[in-house]
Amino acid sequence: MRFRYDDRYDRVYPLEVLGVWTSAQTPGEYTLEDVDNTLRIRIGDPDRTITGQHDYRIVYRVQGALNGFADHDELYWNAIGADWEVPIGVTASVEVWRSWADRLQEEAEEE
């Protein structure tokens, strides 16, 4: 994904979808679309309309999303997008992996 950072730079977030899971009787195939530099994950059968409540679990890895400041780091992330035509309920969780350099430094200090 690519977003305009300022007049000179863009911010690029490499994103990899690791998996999509759906509830029973819910089509689970998916495609990825680039819409105005935003990644859209389209889930389901484009030739079939479904109704009622459905559950989806989308797992993806994104790099470079943390904003670093002198006194703290920040994650500002819109996990569900915008412009939904139906009401949705969302639970999102985030795992932040330490860099290998941090991990090696920590292990060296323990020795």
Image (cartoon, grey):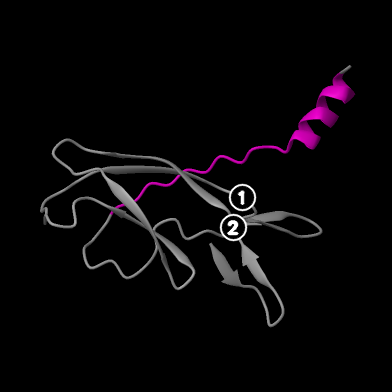
**Label 1: few (<14), some (14–19) or many (≥20) C-alpha neighbours in 10 Å:** few
Task: Give the left or right position of residue 77, taking residue 12 as reference.
Answer: left
Task: Give the left or right position of residue 78, taking residue 29 as reference.
Answer: right
Q: Amino acid at mark 2?
A: Tyr
Residue denoted by label 2:
13
Q: CA distance from mark 2 to mark 1?
A: 6 Å
Q: Residue at x 11, y 51 (%)?
A: 52
Q: Residue at x 73, y 38 (%)?
A: 99
Quadrant position of residue 34: bottom left
In magenta segment, residue 85: no
Circle number at residue 63: 1
Number of labelled discs?
Answer: 2
Circle number at residue 24: none
Check disc 1 and report its element: helix, strand or loop: loop
Q: Position of residue 50 (x, y in %)?
A: 11, 53
Task: Give the left or right position of residue 36, taking residue 104 as reference.
Answer: left
Q: Position of residue 97 (x, y in %)?
A: 64, 38
In magenta segment, residue 108: yes
Which residue range is magenta in the image?
A: 89-110
Check disc 2 and report its element: helix, strand or loop: loop
Q: Give the position of the C terminus as an image quadrant.
A: top right
Quadrant position of residue 56: top left
> Image height check: is 35 above or below 108?
below
Q: Position of residue 84 (x, y in %)?
A: 28, 66
- Tell me if label 2 and label 1 are in contact, CB under 8 Å: yes
Q: Nearer the viewer, residue 45 or 92?
A: 45
Q: Residue at x 89, y 24 (%)?
A: 109
Going from N to C along the chain, the mark reached first, 2 or 1, is 2
Farthest-out residue, top: 111
Q: Amino acid at mark 1?
A: Gln
**Label 2: few (<14), some (14–19) or many (≥20) C-alpha neighbours in 10 Å:** some
